[in-house]
Structures are given as structure tokens and as C-alpha cells.
Image: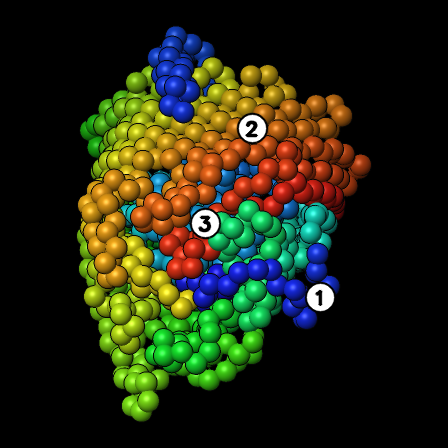
């Protein structure tokens, strides 16, 4: 898929391997029984925990991370009635190149983050099956960086702006409480940058790997005269695993924080992303995948599929205490984003003339604000915390489309403004009832307006009338949850709620039958979500979480038809998601850490439906892009005296259907990775070296799928065995 943010990229069928590389980029040539046993063991451990609870509580509780996502205030994840996991910054940086979030998200249960080695399409992520159909970036999941939305008001978001090298932690929440953050049903992913503290510190790193891949980064942080600062800049470049897949990305992130007055703090966040070129190898059909997974369809090279993107964003967060019990917090942000995408769409066809051509240019302006008040009160039964807020977001895309004339701009085929704005109000409450119960709940009302102003009007030849228009969606989302302290180290919880997802502008872009104009008849999907689980702190060093959930969705948005590079979406009826998520994080020895996460997801169509072309999608078919089973396991060992550490990682996934009819599937796989490194302290200088080998056994497998691709080019191959090595240095002044 190319970088056209407005349209999924499915070019016309083309076989074979291109004979040349892009001239501009020549330098870069190149089972259920097991589940039952695990669950039984977890429940047995949880049941026996009270026997040693009093002895272990003080030492165990630090295993429960402090999080903000879910309640919008700092709170122990152990005491929340939600599924939420934290990936700390050290885990993101240890033995990683820190290029995309898939490196870290693979260890979180319920999350699927395929690595397709296609930077033009940005990182795809799904949570409990929500977002699996996305052809570009992330939808169905709200994204935040330091409290600043990285998702637009229509629900579409990109993870490319996440700065992994300067991150303190990443919080990943699944389930109904995500509805309190707005237009999403799958969850919330929020990354937090470190605060600049202490004496000045300079950092730097250089990394190199297979396929002419390298990355360099430098940073500075500290606190001077009350001003905390952190600045991080990096450049990544790769020739790509596949033909025609080279990419370059420059990234900068800055965070400044200072105290305005007693009880007042301001934080300024700035980030910039520039990807001046990204080649898109597109997907392969099964025959191409079998013959040579590194090849690229001929049309991809002929029409130079790929593109460029850049984004600059700034946000200001001010928090002010109003006495001992009240806090007022305001966030404002603004940004610009520019993209240029080239698709493999043929010239001079009626569909293209009525459509938008094979080159898309989008200039985006966006801004927003969030204001909330938090009040803490004492009641006869326990503490009560109330949060009341309102959120406004705006986005305007100036979109033009042109025919793709062998990679150069051709005839104008689209010229319009796309505008979306939302105005939401929300209320959250948490009430501690006695010593054993915590009740949580909330309500959010959303009003989201889409507007299209069409300037491309043609009355002769193949007609293209004025397609201006708009639509407004409204929804109220309630959630309720409860935690019961079975013991100091075992919590039981349950929650329920309603969520919704509007169509994104990508999904509104085209109408069935080749009709002109946006698909404003497409309705939002709504979900009813219930979840129950147990959180246990076992012994002095082990944390276990188990969640069971069910989601029933009405008017699920699916691909209705796909042709000539464009997808038309429709409401399919009811779907159902049932599943289980298990995570275990323990240290059986002081030097040894073991991590296990397992997910079971049964995501199916509950109703049969027919596409506009007359194809019947049978009830019971699995939602494409959603594996039933995923597993991540890691065993890490550290020798403190020498500074040596090493780890083995294993990932496994069951098969993934590629279309709604379940006519084909990417086979399941299991891969093993290894990493090792040394750390040294030489006076004020800290050094760290590492080597990482991915896909140790050189397994050939599909890294991700292009759902419902019109030409049967569903498969995005993962890389074979590959090597990464790097060195990091830090000096304190």
C-alpha cells in the first residue's frame, strides 16, 4: 500500500518481479490443552497467594505499575477494573533498534502488531480484533503521546511519531474503558516521554543491521534552573528486505517542563517526523509468495509506488492545583501533516477519471484542546474521585489526486477539502467502598461532524458532479467497573460498557458501483463489551493477569468491494468477539526474568450478509486479519557483576484469514529471536553494546496480511534471519 492516507492501495493485478530498482534509490539495492493447563496453574497460584500475602505484600506491590490511562490520574494498575499493561522504556531500548512500536507491543496480550516491512503504510495494530482491517495506520484504537492525541477526530491514527528512544513507558489498555477516550472500541495506547531530571546528560547511539539498515541518534536531558528538558533526534535508513522497499525516517522529540507557581506545572511537547521517501513493495499473491517472497509486483516498480510524509506537532499541558482536593488540567495542541502517495493504478480508465487517480497529495492542519477538573472527596465509606472534562478536536485535509504517470504527476482527478471536528464531554468517577471494593464508572457524549467541500466538478465527458456534503454522528458511551480485593495480593474485577466507531475518511472516500461522492450512508458501529478477570501478585516477584471478555458489535464496518486501487466500505451487521488474555511476569531467580503472554480470540461474523457484488459472507466466518491464538515468551538472564545480559524470545501465531469469505489464509508460524549485550560504567561514561538475531531459524512466513485485497495480493512477507548490532553511550556532567 502506498502512503495515500485516504484510500487503501490495491493496484491492478500484476505478476512477476521487477527488473530494475528505483533510480532515485539505487544506493539501497540489495492448543487448547495447553491453554487449560496454563489457566489452571494460574488460578491455583492465585488461590494460594493469601497464605503468604502478609509477608510478601510490601515487596510485591512495586510490580504493579502506576498508570494514568483509564482514570486520567496516577493509580496502581493492580487496583483498576481494566486490562492494562505497561512496557517500560528499558524494555523498549534493550536490544532493539527502536524504529517502530511493533518491537515492544508483541509482548502485550490481545495486541497484534504485524511487522510488514512496509514503512509507506505505517504501523498497523489491532486490539482484540479492532483495527485488523485497517489498510493504513491504526484505527479503532486511540493513540496518545504525552497526553497529546496521535489519532485524528475520525479515529485514524499513526504511530510513527512515537519516540521510543526517549520513552519512559507505554501504557496499553484494552476493553470498554477505552470508550471514555472517544471514537474507538479496541483500546488506548499511550506513550510517555521521560522527564528531564538531574545533572546534564548526553546520550548517543549507532545501530546497523541486515538489508543496508542503520540508525543513529543523539539526545540530551537534565534540569537547570527549574527547567527540565529532554531532546532526542534520530535518523533511520534501510534498503529494505524486499525489492522496492527502501525507506528513510528522521525524527525529533522534545519535552520541556517547569513549575509556574506553587502547585502549578507546565509541560511543552514538540515532535517532528520526516519520511522523504518510502518505497512500497505492495502485497504478493500466493504464487509470488511461494516463488520469491522478496520480489515486488512489476507495477510497483513501473509506477514507483510509495511516497513521502512529514508531520510537525506541538502541545502544551498545564496542571494547576486548586487547594488540596481539586486539580485543573488543560491541554492544547496543533500540528501540520503532509503526505504524497503513489499507487499502482492504470491510466485513462473511466474508474480513474471518476475516482481520484494514482497519486494523492494531502495537506493537513489539525488542532484541539482538552480541559478537565478533578475533585477528591472523603465519604463515610471511602475516598471518591470525580473527573469532569470536555474535548474539542479539528482536522482539515486539503486533498488533491492525480493520475500516476510512471511515478510522475499526471492529470488532476480530485480536488477537495475534508473537514472533521468533534466536541465531547465526559465524566469519570472512582469510589472506594470500604476496605475491599473499588467502583469505577464514566460517561462520554460525542458529537462528530464530517464535511466534504468538492472543487473538482466536470460536466463533460465522464461526469463528476459537485459531491459536497456532510454528516453528523452522535453517541453516548457509558462504562462501569468494579474491583474486589480478595486478598492483599489478589484482585477480582469486572467491567461493562458501550463503545462506538465512526467511519474514517478513508472508509468514507468511495461509494458502491463507482458512484461519485463520499459514502455518507455509512453508519458508525456500536459495541457492547463485558470483561472479567483476576490480577494476582504471587510470591515476591511474580505478576499474573487473566482476562475473559466478550464484545458484540452491530453495524460492523467492512470492505464491501475493492477494485482499481480503491475500497468501498459497508455496514455488515453483527459480529462477535470472545476471548482470553493471560500474562505472567516473574523472576524465579534474581538474575532471571520470565515473561509469558497468551491470547485467544474468536472473532466471527454473527450474521450473514451480501456484498454489493452479490457475494454472501456466511455467519460464523472469522474476521480477517485476526489470529485465534498468539503467544509471546521471553527468558532473560543478567549477570550483574560482568554487565552481561542475554535473552531468548519466541513468538507464535495461528493462521490468519485474508478475506471475509475465508477463502485463503496466511499459515501460522513460530519464530525465535535472540539478543545479548554488555554494559560498562567507565567513570561518568556508560556504555552498552548489543547484538540481536531475529528469526533465528530463518523461517519463511507471512508478517502481515492486506485484508480483502482485490487482486489476491494478500501477503506481506516477513524477513528471514537478520542481524542487528548497536552501541549506546551516555555521559553525565
| x, y percent for residue 397 | 39, 73
Mark 2 or mark 3: name the one nearer the start of the chain: 2
User: Which label lies toward us, 2 or 3?
Assistant: 3
- Location of residue 557 with respect to 602 vertically, above or below: below
- Total numbered circles: 3
> For residue 357, which quarter of the picture?
bottom left
Q: Nearest the camera: 101 or 202? A: 101
> Residue at 54% across / 49% down in the picture?
289
How busy is the neighbourhood of tag 1: few (under 14 within 10 Å), some, or many (20 plus)?
few
Q: Is residue 461 left or right of residue 361?
A: left
> Along the line of sight, which residue is nearer the eye, 657 or 645?
657
Separation of marks 3 and 1 at Cα, in angstroms: 28 Å
Residue at point 50%, 56% (across, down): 283
Residue 38: image quadrant is top left
Q: Position of residue 33 (x, y in %)?
A: 39, 19
Q: Does 30 sit left or right of 369 as displayed?
A: right
Sequence-wise first label, 2 or 1 = 1
Residue matched to label 2: 634
Sequence order check: which comes first, mark 3 or mark 1?
1
42 vs 88, left or right, is left
Identify the residue shown where x is 31% and y is 91%.
460
Query: Separation of disc 2 and disc 1 at Cα?
Result: 38 Å
**Residue 51 location (% of width, % of height):** 39, 8
User: Do the residues under discs 2 and 1 have CB atoms within 8 angstroms?
Assistant: no
Residue occupied by mark 1: 26
Q: Of the residues tagged 2 and 1, which is closer to the observer?
A: 1
Question: Is disc 3 placed on a helix, strand or loop?
Answer: strand
In depth, the one of 366 and 383 nearer the eye is 366
* Residue 273 horizontal/vertical position (percent): 56, 62
Amino acid at each position: 500500500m502506498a502512503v495515500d492516507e485516504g484510500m487503501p492501495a490495491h493496484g491492478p493485478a500484476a505478476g512477476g518481479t521487477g527488473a530494475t530498482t528505483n533510480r532515485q534509490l539505487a544506493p539501497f539495492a540489495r492448543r487448547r490443552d495447553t491453554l487449560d493447563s496454563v489457566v489452571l496453574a494460574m488460578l491455583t497460584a492465585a488461590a494460594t497467594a493469601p497464605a503468604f500475602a502478609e509477608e510478601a505484600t510490601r515487596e510485591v506491590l512495586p510490580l504493579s505499575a502506576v498508570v494514568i490511562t483509564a482514570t486520567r490520574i496516577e493509580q496502581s494498575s493492580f487496583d483498576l477494573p481494566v486490562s492494562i499493561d505497561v512496557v517500560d522504556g528499558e524494555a523498549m531500548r534493550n536490544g532493539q533498534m527502536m524504529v517502530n512500536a511493533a518491537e515492544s507491543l508483541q509482548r502485550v496480550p490481545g495486541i497484534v502488531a504485524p511487522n510488514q516491512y512496509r514503512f509507506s503504510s505505517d504501523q498497523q495494530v489491532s486490539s482484540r480484533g479492532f483495527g485488523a482491517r485497517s489498510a493504513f495506520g491504526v484505527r479503532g484504537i486511540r493513540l496518545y503521546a504525552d497526553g497529546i492525541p496521535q489519532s485524528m477526530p475520525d479515529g485514524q491514527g499513526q504511530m510513527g511519531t512515537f519516540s521510543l528512544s526517549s520513552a519512559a513507558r507505554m501504557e496499553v489498555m484494552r476493553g470498554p474503558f477505552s470508550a471514555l477516550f472517544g471514537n474507538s472500541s479496541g483500546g488506548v495506547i499511550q506513550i510517555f516521554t521521560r522527564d528531564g531530571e538531574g545533572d546534564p546528560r548526553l546520550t548517543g547511539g549507532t545501530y546497523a543491521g541486515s538489508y543496508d539498515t542503520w540508525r543513529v541518534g543523539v539526545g540530551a536531558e537534565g534540569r537547570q534552573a527549574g527547567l527540565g528538558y529532554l531532546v532526542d533526534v534520530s535518523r533511520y535508513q534501510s534498503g529494505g528486505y524486499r525489492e522496492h522497499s527502501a525507506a528513510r525516517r528522521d525524527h525529533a522529540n522534545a519535552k520541556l517542563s517547569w513549575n509556574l507557581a506553587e502547585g502549578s506545572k507546565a509541560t511543552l511537547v514538540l515532535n517532528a517526523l520526516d519520511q522523504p521517501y518510502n518505497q512500497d513493495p505492495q502485497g504478493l499473491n500466493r504464487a509470488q509468495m511461494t516463488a520469491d517472497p522478496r520480489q515486488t509486483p512489476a507495477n510497483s516498480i513501473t509506477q514507483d509506488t510509495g511516497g513521502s510524509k512529514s508531520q510537525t506537532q506541538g502541545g502544551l499541558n498545564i496542571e494547576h492545583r486548586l487547594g488540596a482536593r481539586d486539580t485543573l488540567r488543560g491541554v492544547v495542541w496543533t500540528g501540520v501533516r503532509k503526505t504524497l502517495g503513489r499507487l499502482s493504478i492504470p491510466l485513462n480508465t473511466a474508474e480513474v477519471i471518476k475516482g481520484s487517480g494514482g497519486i494523492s497529495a494531502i495537506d493537513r492542519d489539525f488542532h484541539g484542546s482538552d480541559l478537565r477538573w478533578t475533585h477528591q472527596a472523603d465519604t463515610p465509606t471511602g475516598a471518591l474521585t470525580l473527573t469532569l472534562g470536555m474535548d474539542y478536536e479539528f482536522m482539515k485535509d486539503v486533498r488533491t489526486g492525480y493520475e500516476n504517470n510512471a511515478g510522475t504527476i499526471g492529470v488532476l482527478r480530485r480536488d477537495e477539502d475534508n473537514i472533521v471536528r468533534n466536541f465531547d464531554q465526559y465524566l469519570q468517577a472512582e469510589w472506594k467502598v470500604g476496605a475491599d471494593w473499588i467502583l469505577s464508572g464514566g460517561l462520554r457524549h460525542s458529537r462528530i461532524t464530517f464535511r466534504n467541500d468538492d472543487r473538482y466538478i466536470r460536466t463533460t465527458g465522464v461526469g463528476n458532479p459537485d459531491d459536497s456534503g456532510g454528516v453528523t454522528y452522535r453517541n453516548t458511551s457509558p462504562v462501569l467497573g468494579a474491583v474486589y480485593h480478595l486478598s492483599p495480593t489478589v484482585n477480582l474485577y469486572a467491567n461493562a460498557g458501550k463503545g462506538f466507531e465512526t467511519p474514517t475518511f478513508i472508509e468514507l472516500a468511495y461509494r458502491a458501483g463507482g458512484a461519485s461522492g463520499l459514502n455518507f450512508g455509512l453508519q458508525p458501529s456500536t459495541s457492547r463489551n463485558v470483561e472479567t478477570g483476576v490480577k494476582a501478585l504471587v510470591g515476591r516477584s511474580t505478576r499474573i493477569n487473566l482476562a475473559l471478555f466478550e464484545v458484540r458489535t452491530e453495524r460492523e464496518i467492512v470492505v464491501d468491494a475493492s477494485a482499481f486501487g480503491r475500497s468501498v466500505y459497508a455496514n455488515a451487521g453483527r459480529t462477535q468477539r470472545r476471548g482470553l488474555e493471560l500474562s505472567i511476569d516473574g523472576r524465579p531467580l534474581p538474575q532471571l526474568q520470565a515473561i509469558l503472554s497468551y491470547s485467544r480470540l474468536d472473532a466471527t461474523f454473527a450474521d450473514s450478509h451480501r456484498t454489493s457484488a452479490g457475494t454472501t459472507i456466511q455467519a460464523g466466518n472469522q474476521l480477517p486479519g485476526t489470529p485465534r491464538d498468539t503467544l509471546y515468551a521471553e527468558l532473560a538472564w543478567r549477570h550483574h557483576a560482568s554487565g552481561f545480559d542475554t535473552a531468548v524470545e519466541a513468538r507464535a501465531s495461528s493462521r490468519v484469514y485474508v478475506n471475509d469469505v475465508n477463502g485463503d489464509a496466511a499459515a501460522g508460524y513460530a519464530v525465535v529471536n535472540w539478543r545479548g549485550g554488555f554494559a560498562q560504567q567507565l567513570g561518568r561514561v556508560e556504555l552498552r553494546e548489543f547484538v540481536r538475531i531475529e528469526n533465528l531459524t530463518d523461517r519463511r512466513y507471512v508478517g502481515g496480511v492486506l485484508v480483502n485485497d482485490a487482486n489476491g495480493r494478500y501477503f506481506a512477507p516477513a524477513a528471514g534471519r537478520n542481524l542487528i548490532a548497536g552501541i549506546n553511550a551516555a555521559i553525565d556532567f
